[in-house]
Amino acid sequence: MTATALQFKDWMGQVQAQMESALSHYLPASTHIPERLHDAMRYSVLDGGKRVRPLLVFAAGQLVDAEPQRLQAVGAAVEMIHAYSLVHDDMPPMDNDVLRRGKPTVHIAFGEATALLAGDALQTAAFDVLTASTLADQPQDQLKMVNILARASGSLGMCGGQGIDLYSVGQALTLPELEHMHILKTGALIRAAVLLGSYCGTPLSDEQRTDLDHYAKCIGLAFQVVDDILDCEADSATLGKTAGKDAANNKPTYVALLGMKGAKQKAEELKQAAFTALASFGEKAQLLHALAGYIVDRKY
Ligand code: GRG
């Protein structure tokens, strides 16, 4: 491993540790009544996950010299939305999964009604954190941040993407349709994480914001392409299948549409496009650059 790669790994470890404490701080304590609901919320968020979205918040914060406390709050808000989406996605009417991050899913551990409530409460807790303290220099910027997170999470963002996914089961999606679904389902929150981090410090110019947004769109889509590749590889290894669980469940994937080689090439192209979008930021975009590499080259 090179010195730069080691420094990046150290930085990731530090942000992940900071986020664990920040999330624990912002989530209601288990001792609050109703304890069962707060236990379920904490169970779904703490002690697990790569924290990719908070890492992006911090990396974008570096561009604008943002204060760590602001980035922790914003990272916590985004991670709470992410956790809520996983809790609901795992439930029987959606993916019906029994394991997440190596432990029983929330509805298995706490029951379906509590899982539903925990997801709902995590969603509103995110907006509580995003509005409870000053996170941008200008009040209108903080208002914009609330709007960015709401848009990215709702029916024009993540929920909309999940809807397209649900309604397309058993249908043959074209590549543009698959791409549209993932830009919303996974990409919208990743894009929001990058933009939100950039609102926490010195304002960017419109041109810089456009470049940053382009970077965020590329890595948001790359994240899903790589997720499909990893799913397919894991399922091939354990089940001896070549198409992966999603394809076996009749869900469209990049690997099914492009083949493994084509999907890997697509991820590489998106990474290069993300790098290009960062060119004008120079040294300040080092962490965003490294994160694009991490997202595309990760092994889990
Ligand atoms: C139910 C409203 C609602 C939305 C669900 C994002 C989503 C929409 C569902 C997740 C389904 C899924 C597993 C998609 C694949 C990509 C993805 C988001 C993987 C999980 O994210 P990671 O890898 O997870 O960042 P960790 O555990 O590291 O936090």
Image (tube, rainbow, N blue to C red):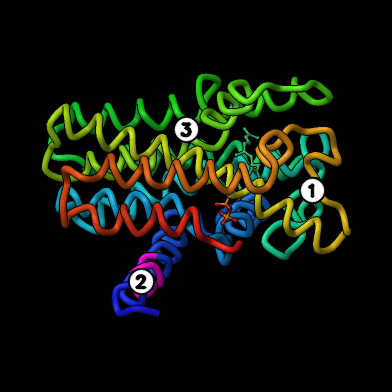
Residue 69 magenta-drawn?
Answer: no
| Residue at 39% in and 72% down | 9
Give the left or right position of residue 142, taking residue 38 as reference. Answer: left
Q: For the residue with label 2, is its CB less than 8 Å from the closest atom of ligand 1?
A: no
| Residue at 27% in and 27% down | 144
Give the left or right position of residue 256, taking residue 74 as reference. Answer: right
- Residue matched to label 2: 14
3D distance between C-alphas at marks 2 and 1: 34 Å
- Residue matched to label 3: 188
Tell me if residue 72 comes above or below residue 18 in the rendering: above
| Residue at 35% in and 43% down | 274
Estimate the x, y position of residue 179 in percent, counting from the top left. 57, 28
Residue type, numbered disc 3: Ala
Where, by quadrant of the figure, is residue 208 drawn? top left
- Residue matched to label 1: 244
Residue type, numbered disc 1: Gly
Which of discs 3 and 1 lies nearer the camera? The answer is 1
3D distance between C-alphas at marks 3 and 2: 25 Å
